[in-house]
Amino acid sequence: MNAQATVTNKALLIGKGLPPFESIKPEDVVPTMTELLAELEQELTNLETTVKPTWNDLVEPLQKLVDRLSWSWGIVGHLMGVKNSPELRKAYNEVQPKVVEFSSKLSQSKPLYQAFKKLHNSDRWQNLDSGQKRIVEAAIRDAELSGVALEGEQRERFNTIQLELAELSTKFSNNVLDATKAFSLTLTNKEEVDGLPPSLLSLAAQGARDAGAENATPENGPWRITLDYPSFVPFMQHSKRRELREQLYKAFISRASSGELNNYPLIGRILELRQQKTKILGFNSYAELSLASKMAPGVAAVEKLLEELRSVSYDAAVTDLEELKKFAASKNAPEANDLKHWDTSFWAERLREEKFAFTAEELRPYFPLPQVLDGLFALVKRIFGINITAADGEAPVWHQDVRYFQVSDETNTPIAYFYLDAYSRPAEKRGGAWMNECITRAKLVENGQTTLRLPVAYLQCNQTPPVDGKPSLMTFREVETLFHEFGHGLQHMLTTVDYAGAAGINNVEWDAVELPSQFMENWCYDRATLFGMAKHYQTGETLPEHYYQKLLAARNYMSGSGMLRQLHFALVDIELHHRYQPGGEETVMDVRNRIAQTTTVLAPLPEDSFLCAFGHIFAGGYAAGYYSYKWAEVLSADAFAAFEEAGLEDEVAIATCGKRFRDTVLALGGSLHPMEVFKTFRGREPHTEPLLRHSGLIAAV
């Protein structure tokens, strides 16, 4: 088929400006992307033959090429997340391998790599600013980590490993998905659902109907419980039937660990191939290879941080467990002195209800979305001096509920825009919340004319849509999520870097990218911010003080146990990728159990195969990188501590501190190393004390 002849709608090929969503159809994806990739292949070949080692003859034309691919493929990827359909999915799956193949060709281009090296070693290097230097250094590093310097057999072996690793991670992920789907527990009498909340009964009845019990109702069953988080987690928290909790827990921890879906052989092969790849590239361990492109200076620094947090959170987790035992004993529970893994969630939830005496649902009326947005926009004006105004109708959207906003500076000059797609649409939109780039800030030169391209962000959440004339009413967790994603958006939108390759979140190290997002979450607990937005949607009444106090108290409930759990995952990940020898004396399970001795207060059961479902490190981007969550949390807590030290009640001090944060963390993007950015903001390297204090693990000083 001649792709050229079939492309009638060229909306996906425009390559600049706001995406014309109403003109983009799934059937256009394959022909337009095929045409674009053919054009880009030709452009790459031309660039490789004419390239000169200067900024204008290398980086700028390469960025233009990358921009065109990002614009078109970015729209397709965005629609996969927010307007999914069988037709779009089929088209995406058909084109994706071609995009990956082209990206590999780009990253392994010898002529471009040589040109970058020559530029780096030339006299012109001194004339580049820090942002330009970081872009060139990252290009050289990424090319080397992609195997560009390899020749002959080694290169062939490297590419074979890359291909096999990609296949293994997809298979690992599919096995977890299939194993999760394969198990279900159908309950038929009311005693078996004792304690379950109405929301879970509705979900379980719906599950039973989907499985063929067409008359299932939330009131009379049957009820189908699965290992999916929305079913599994509330069941473990609320079911009064201990033997059913045990059955479900044991099924959950042994997912994908036997039969056709067994991930153990895949784990062994993945670790073996990663080690081979490491050796080919000249690193001592896969962890060192992973850290080569991250903020953390090395494995020792990561382990030092994790150990510091572990030593504090371990004792707190022991205390948490003792408190649960005492509480269970006070309720005359026979299992009180011997709590098992399937008891802890249940008793933690009972104790939470008794201690804080409020539910997430109770607070919803105080957090209508329009009011929360007003509060969020007032906060960023207060601390960063920016104005956010509605600009609905000024941009094409992919769904009628999507909003569009303009961000202006102190002089009311527009500096950025963002879309907000706030509501859940299960039939076509994936779960969770995320920020994505639509357009990246850049200074562009066309025919001798310089123009500034303003950044545009996509912000997606999954809240309850407005129903029966009521606005979308949010849980407090959803409010935190909105603030979190907006933090990512701010780093994308408030950048002052003029090169797309280092603007906003581009070229920011993986373990530093969560700094602005986690930083923004802290403001949800700030008195002025919370009371400014928490108002009852019907009466306008401000959230009562006792709820605020309970929110503060509940924030750190069992935080030692929560932190220890994350440290367990992070330390197992580092150990497997730094010291473990595939095929040696110790198995992966031995490694996990050894680490568990100091990172769990209830030792894992013999049949616990959590590694077989640890998708983050075996099927995601977190291999030897799971520590990043905690690393960034240290940075974000310390950044917020700067505002606490300035005085949260002192508006002038807050604005001064906010300007400093905006001019460093939010403005500099990937143009400087994140440690330099942090030190410029804070005046020193990060400390762990604020995170431990915010988590309630050490007393406020």
Image: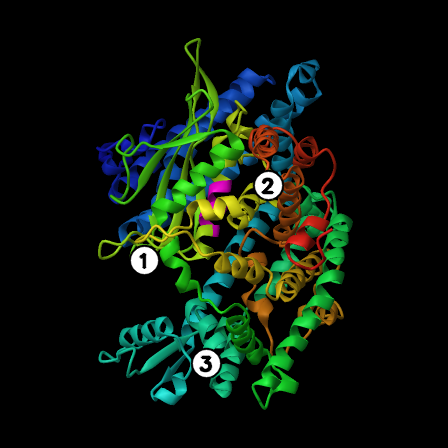
Q: Nearer the viewer, residue 469 or 88?
A: 469
Q: CA distance from mark 3 to mark 2?
A: 42 Å
515 relative to 546, above or below: above
Membership of 484 in magenta stretch: yes
Q: Is residue 230 left or right of residue 622?
A: left
Q: Is residue 70 left or right of residue 611?
A: left
Return the residue at label 3: 239
Is residue 186 visible in the rendered image? The answer is: yes
| Amino acid found under the numbered disc labelled 2 | Leu
| Amino acid found under the numbered disc labelled 1 | Pro
Write down the quadrant of residue 148 in the picture.
top right
User: Viewer-nearest of labels 3 and 2?
Assistant: 2
Q: Is residue 624 left or right of residue 469?
A: right
The numbered disc on residue 426 is 1
Q: Nearer the viewer, residue 58 or 330?
A: 330
Magenta stretch in the rendered image = 480-487
